[in-house]
Image (spheres, rainbow, N blue to C red):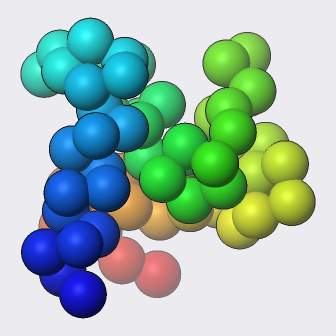
Amino acid sequence: MITAGTAHFRNNLSQYGSADDVDAIYTALRVYNSGVVDPTNLSNGLGATDSYVSDIANRLCGRSR
């Protein structure tokens, strides 16, 4: 499951330039979670979890709810 999820995210990231920057990573996270992205508002889940991108970003920074 983890391997499949990692491969899925890696594929999403490659669609957005594979850059090591927040724009590419957070956009790929939004696509990973919902399948689509509102580039003007990454907190718009478009039917999926609205807070997913910020939740993951907070976990990566060592903060959790």
Compared across the picture, whether 62 is left or right of 29 comes to: left
Compared across the picture, whether 39 is left or right of 20 comes to: right
Of residues 3 and 57, the one nearer the viewer is: 3
**Do we see residue 51 in this rendering?**
yes
**Do we see residue 21 in this rendering?**
no
Q: Looking at the image, is 46 positioned above or below residue 4?
A: above
Q: Residue at x 86, y 60 (%)?
A: 47
Circle count: 0
Compared across the picture, whether 49 is left or right of 32 comes to: right
Give the quadrant of residue 24.
top left
Q: Residue at x 28, y 40 (%)?
A: 11
Q: Position of residue 19 (x, y in %)?
A: 17, 15
Q: Looking at the image, is 31 positioned above or below residue 61?
A: above
Q: Looking at the image, is 62 positioned above or below residue 7?
A: below
Q: Looking at the image, is 17 positioned above or below residue 3?
A: above
Q: Residue at x 24, y 87 (%)?
A: 1
Q: Position of residue 59 (x, y in %)?
A: 28, 67
Give the quadrant of residue 28.
top left
Q: Position of residue 34 (x, y in %)?
A: 66, 55
